[in-house]
């Protein structure tokens, strides 16, 4: 099989195995790399969630009235970390869905 950059020569691939085309090769490549992508995304998601400031105290879980800690305006790095957590969560969910579709 002759590989030029990232483009596979389809005729040499068909000589190697007549039922494999470039789409099948692409799916096999994604299926091989996808678990590593999910591991990296999961570690990033765990880190982003743990770095966020909670603000709510433990008394709120037992019926305490601490409404001032529940709602606050995110500013600066906390705001970007919040948005990054959402994006990483969506990417992780998308990669899990892709893994279900491929397998």
Image: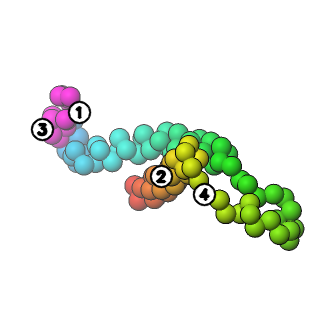
Q: Quadrant of residue 57?
A: bottom right
Residue on which disc 4 sits = 73
Residue on which disc 3 sits = 11
- Between discs 1 and 3, the one toward the N terminus: 1
> Where is residue 2 drawn, in percent x and y?
18, 28
| C-alpha gap between disc 2 and disc 4 | 19 Å
Q: Quadrant of residue 33?
A: top left
| The one of 81 and 23 positioned closer to us in this rendering | 81
Left or right? Give the position of 18 relative to 62.
Answer: left
- Between discs 3 and 4, the one toward the N terminus: 3
Q: Residue furthest left?
A: 11
The 10 Å Cα crowd at callout 3, few under 14, some 14 to 19, many 20 or more, is: few
The 10 Å Cα crowd at callout 2, few under 14, some 14 to 19, many 20 or more, is: few
| C-alpha gap between disc 3 and disc 2 | 40 Å
Q: Quadrant of the C terminus?
A: bottom left
| C-alpha gap between disc 2 and disc 1 | 28 Å
Q: Are marks 1 and 3 in contact (CB under 8 Å)?
A: no
For the residues carrying marks 3 and 4, which lies nearer the camera in this image?
Answer: 4
**Number of marks in the rendered image:** 4
Residue on which disc 1 sits = 6
Chain part drawn in magenta: 1-15
Residue on which disc 2 sits = 87
**In terms of secondary structure, where does tag 3 sit?**
helix
Q: Residue at x 83, y 69 (%)?
A: 65
Q: Are marks 3 and 2 in contact (CB under 8 Å)?
A: no
Q: Is residue 65 visible?
A: yes
> Where is residue 86 drawn, in percent x and y?
52, 55
| C-alpha gap between disc 3 and disc 4 | 59 Å
Q: Residue at x 59, y 41 (%)?
A: 43
């Amino acid at each position: 099989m002759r590989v030029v950059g990232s483009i596979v020569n389809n005729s040499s691939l068909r000589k190697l195995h007549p039922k494999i085309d470039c789409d099948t090769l692409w799916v096999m490549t994604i299926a091989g790399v996808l678990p590593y992508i999910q591991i990296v995304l999961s570690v990033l998601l765990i880190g982003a969630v743990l770095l966020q400031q909670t603000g709510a105290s433990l008394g709120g879980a037992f019926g305490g009235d601490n409404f001032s800690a529940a709602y606050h305006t995110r500013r600066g790095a906390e705001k970007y970390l919040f948005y990054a957590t959402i994006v990483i969560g969506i990417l992780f969910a998308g990669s899990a869905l892709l893994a279900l579709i491929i397998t």
